[in-house]
Image: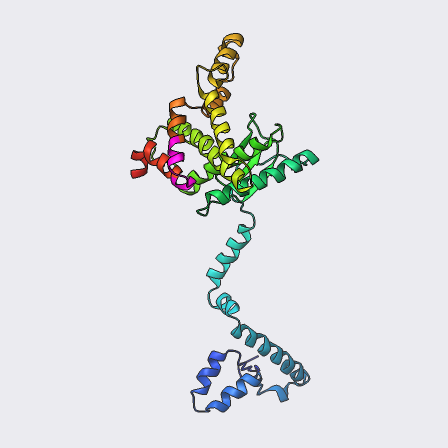
Amino acid sequence: MNGRDTPVYNVVLSTHIDRRASEGENGIGLAKSARRRVRVVSPKSRRVPDLVSANVKRRKLGAKVQRFCRGLDENRGANFVRNQPAYAAWMIVFVVLGFQIQVWEGPPEGPEYSLSARDECLERMVKGAVGNSLKVIGHGVQVSTVRVRPLKYSTLATYNFTHDSVEFTTDFSFRADQVLHTAAHESVHAIFDQACLNPTSPNVDWERWMLVQEVTAEVLGAHIAGRVRTLNGGDGEALTKMLIARYRNVCDRSSNESIHRKIWIAAIRMGVDKIDQDYAYSVSIHFGPVELVDAIDKICCENPDPWEAAHVVAERYLPEELEE
């Protein structure tokens, strides 16, 4: 079949062509005509009987194509895919792969723990204690999640700085004052984390700083617990004095209740090689010398605002690291 016998189909699809047509000799009329329909020109169609019967179908199909392409012109996303196919392909690849990528959030946890009636009661107490402690602290310090579940290594409670969450163990029978004090203790860790008071220098003495922060959490936590007790109509001052005296007693190496003395006696009786050194260290790091307990207690008394007290502690015991 030669060029003269080949039907010629002039299909006007794009509004860009319409715009150029509107600027030509035919004026606006051609643009409107192009938007209304798809023109099919077949000079030899009368000589080809097979194509005569198909013209109607072609017109209907052309109208459908025109409506479809008009929709593409009005859709920015479709225009981007049509005009930038390479970029669109890369975007599709990233989107598809994105569903397969998961952010690392630590090792996988075990199966979800089912709370008993006792655990549910404890969780309600803990949530209330943490919430009241945060109200006393203020300054936007927050905890996103509070829950009760079994914890490893005989841990009573912990603050997770990655998720701003507080967790209490189910393996300990907390008294009401212990729940309140422990909740305040973990809230103090939230202050140091969210106020950016933890050192970032690689040369910091981390053992010393961990000891300072744990003692501060215990002493400042006692002051916060007392404030909460006062707001609830109780004797908060008496509670604070009792909690600090009890903590000071277990930190005093000359006391029979000293945690350091108990670890040392266990090592003598059982043998040093029988003692879990990591566990003994993790326990002892929470109990500093009496002189440090008294110094931080004085800071807390001079600075009733827990936020300010934490800043004073950090400036006094980590001046070089904070200046960096």
Q: Nearer the viewer, residue 72 or 266?
A: 266
**SS majority, magenta:** helix
The location of residue 99, given as percent across then percent down, is 56, 50
Q: Quadrant of residue 46?
A: bottom right
Q: Position of residue 20 (x, y in %)?
A: 44, 83
Q: Residue at x 58, y 41 (%)?
A: 128
Is the residue 298 above or below the residue 55 in the image? Answer: above
Percent across and percent down for residue 318 are: 33, 33
Q: Nearer the viewer, residue 5 or 133?
A: 133
Q: Is residue 100 above or below residue 7?
A: above
Q: Quadrant of the C terminus?
A: top left
Image point 46% across, 48% down: which residue? 140
Q: Is residue 164 one of those drawn in magenta?
A: no
From which residue to which does the magenta span run? 298-308
Q: Position of residue 56 (x, y in %)?
A: 66, 84
Q: Is residue 301 magenta?
A: yes
Q: Is residue 173 visible?
A: yes
Residue found at x 59% / y 87%: 44
Residue sitting at 53 percent across and 46 percent down?
101
27 or 145: which is nearer to us? 145
